[in-house]
Amino acid sequence: MLSAEDEKELTLIDHLVELRDRILKCVVTIVVLFLALFYWANDIYNYVAMPLIQALPEGSSMIAIDPTSPFFAPFKLTFYVAFLLAAPYILYQLWSFIAPGLYKNEKAVAIPLFISSVLLFYAGVAFARYILFGIVFAFFISVAPDGIQVAPDISSFLSFALTIFFAFGIAFEIPIAVFLCIWAGLAEPDSLSEKRPYVVVSCFVIAMLLTPPDPFTQSMLALPMWALFEVGILAGRIIRKRQAEEEAAASQ
């Protein structure tokens, strides 16, 4: 018969094997999506770069300084798109791994949070692509000095775009973070509301670190972060009210 230590070690090994299998499934999913999208790699790049292309002066275009950029820039972007599209499946695998260890009430909260986190990240990326890019590129090109021909490098643009996508995707997760702090009892809605001035300053500091060094782009990130913080407080107030009602019902 196995001892208690042997059974514990066996359970740990089983969990590690399961985790390995789920990670492999995620990697395979990303690779399959990447291979399926690679044929349209140039189209995907043009779609992402369209706000910049449309804002360029007539007769100007993007350039490739590095001879390998025309291949590797769309290649790199397509990989990130594949990862982004695989995010729901990756989160599903994560959920399937940790769900057996959660209580029923924790599962009831975790499922909406997983779904909301994916949707909010997509919303952050969409905000950057459809709203921010058009405004930012038009502004910067309009203030270019006379005699300067604006011709952005495709690799530099990709680095800029990925940074902005990541920054806005993470920033749009703020309501989830605030909600979790309130739900777990780490903070109260009223106490967070009192710290609003510090939060506003922190939003601008974080925006300064995550975005290019210009006040316009930083404000376009900091202001939504502040608004999403307020959304998180509102959701926290709702869950606090529901918890109070459940506690009152249980005490009767």
Image (cartoon, grey):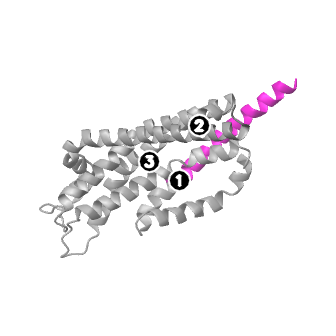
Q: Tell me the number on the disc at residue 124.
A: 3
Viewer-side label of 2, 1: 2
Is residue 211 among the parts visible in the rendering?
A: yes
Looking at the rendered structure, the kind of residue marked 2 is: Ile
Name the kind of residue labelled 3 in the image.
Answer: Gly
Judge depth for marks 3 and 2 and give the one in front. 2
Q: Residue 91 vs residue 76: left or right?
A: right
Q: Secondary structure at mark 1?
A: helix
In terms of depth relative to the viewer, which is nearer, 131 or 120?
Answer: 120
Q: Badge 2: few (under 14), some or many (20 or more) residues near its Cα, within 10 Å?
A: few
The answer to which of marks 1 and 3 sits earlier in the sequence is 3
Name the image quarter holding residue 164. bottom left
Which of the pair 240/82 is nearer the observer?
82
Q: Residue at x 56, y 53 (%)?
A: 226
Q: Residue 157 placed where, x, y %?
A: 28, 61
- Residue denoted by label 1: 225
Numbered range of the magenta stretch: 224-252
Q: How many marks?
A: 3
The residue identified by callout 2 is 98
**Helix or strand or loop: what does disc 2 sit on?**
helix
User: Which residue occupies 55% across, 48% down?
Assistant: 228
- Name the residue at 42% across, 43% down: 122
Whether residue 49 is visible here, answered yes or no, is no
Viewer-side label of 1, 3: 3
- Vertical position of residue 159 compared to residue 180: above or below: below
Q: Residue at x 51, y 35 (%)?
A: 115
- Can you say which quadrant of the picture contains the N terminus? top right
Q: Position of residue 195 (x, y in %)?
A: 69, 57
**Of helix, strand and loop, which one carries label 3?**
helix
